[in-house]
Image (cartoon, rainbow, N blue to C red):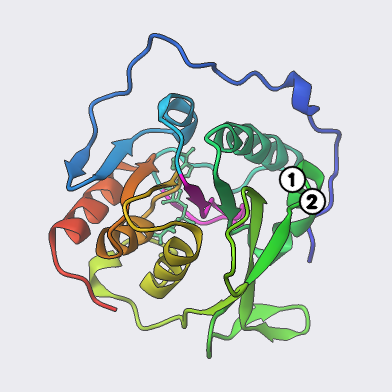
Amino acid sequence: MIQKETTPVAPVHAIVIPSASPLTLPKPYYESGGITIYHSDCKNILPFIDSVKAIIADPPYNVGYNYGGGVDDRMSVADYEVWCRTWFLMAKQKGGTVAVSPGIANLGVWHRIEEPRWIMCWRKGDSRGRCPVGWTKWEPVLLWGAMPKNIADTFDAPIQPLDPQVVGHPCPKPLRWGAALVDKLSDLGETVCDPFMGSGTVLVAAKYAGRKAIGIEQNEEYCEMASKRLSQGVLF
Ligand SMILES: C[S@@+](CC[C@H](N)C(=O)[O-])C[C@H]1O[C@@H](n2cnc3c(N)ncnc32)[C@H](O)[C@@H]1O
């Protein structure tokens, strides 16, 4: 079901975004070969990183997952909308493309925040997630900002048996999901940023595609998980 607004949310002009300041970024949790991880709330980091080619954001869907690390995945719809709007405005200031995996139920929230310029389709293969009409085999990826040129707007990334490297994270995306988005939204040598890094899917895909990447994650356990993945081989 599409989440409906229940109470008024803060207008865009009421949200204060930290401007660039003499503050420096904290010491990275991991840094190697152009891949950097910050262990932090993304709102504390996004204002201070340089422009990137693409932000690839897979935020919590507000469905009650337990991410640990002080993450609240059960907000009111109004609070969730304000929270998304806050980091989204920070992300948009980085230039480039902003891609958000919103979860189907949050499409209403995101259209109220800002009408996307386009919607891509992730085909999830034989996955059988429940939905009001039975089961669903796709998810949207919303795009704002600079549009990539000459790409197909659908991609296949089947949900696969859990990779042992990501056991312990409640909802890691398939590596092919990260690989497709990195490939479509950036070119060799460019930088992508994943503000909700989780198990590090986008960073691993970026590493193997010859991109630079910045990942931000609030839960230190997942920073460790991603660091280990980046230090090891890749399982497609
Ligand atoms: C849907 S998961 C992302 C999964 C990731 N795409 C993957 O493949 O593993 C969302 C992640 O965002 C993290 N998170 C939630 N709020 C955050 C915040 N304010 N700043 C940084 N990370 C946050 C959660 O701990 C969780 O790991």
Image quadrant containing the N terminus:
bottom right
**As displayed, is residue 14 above or below residue 204?**
above
Q: Residue 154, percent across and down?
A: 60, 76
Residue in the image at 65% along x and 55% along y: 143
Horizontally, residue 177 falls left or right of residue 154, namely left
Residue in the image at 45% along x and 11% along y: 21
Circles 2 and 1: CB atoms closer than 8 Å: no
Q: Tell me if the residue at label 1 has its CB under 8 Å from ligand 1.
A: no
Hey, which residue is sitting farthest top in the picture? 22
Q: CA distance from mark 2 to mark 1?
A: 13 Å
Residue that mark 2 sits on: 111
Q: Residue 50, percent across and down?
A: 41, 30
Q: Nearer the viewer, residue 188 or 110?
A: 188
Q: Residue 14, percent across and down?
A: 75, 20
**What predominant SS class does the magenta segment belong to?**
loop
In reply to whether residue 57 is colored magenta, the answer given is: yes
Packing grade of label 2 (10 A; few <14, some 14-19, many >=20) is few
Residue in the image at 55% along x and 38% along y: 95
Q: Residue 104, percent across and down?
A: 69, 66
Hey, which residue is sitting farthest front in the picture? 150
Q: Nearer the viewer, residue 56 or 82?
A: 56
Horizontally, residue 223 falls left or right of residue 147, namely left
**What are the residue bounds of the magenta stretch?**
53-67
Hey, which residue is sitting farthest left in the picture? 232
**As displayed, is residue 132 above or below residue 115?**
below
Task: Give the numbered dot on residue 132.
Answer: none
Residue in the image at 40% along x and 74% along y: 176
In reply to whether residue 209 is colored magenta, the answer given is: no
Amino acid found under the numbered disc labelled 1: Val
Residue that mark 1 sits on: 77
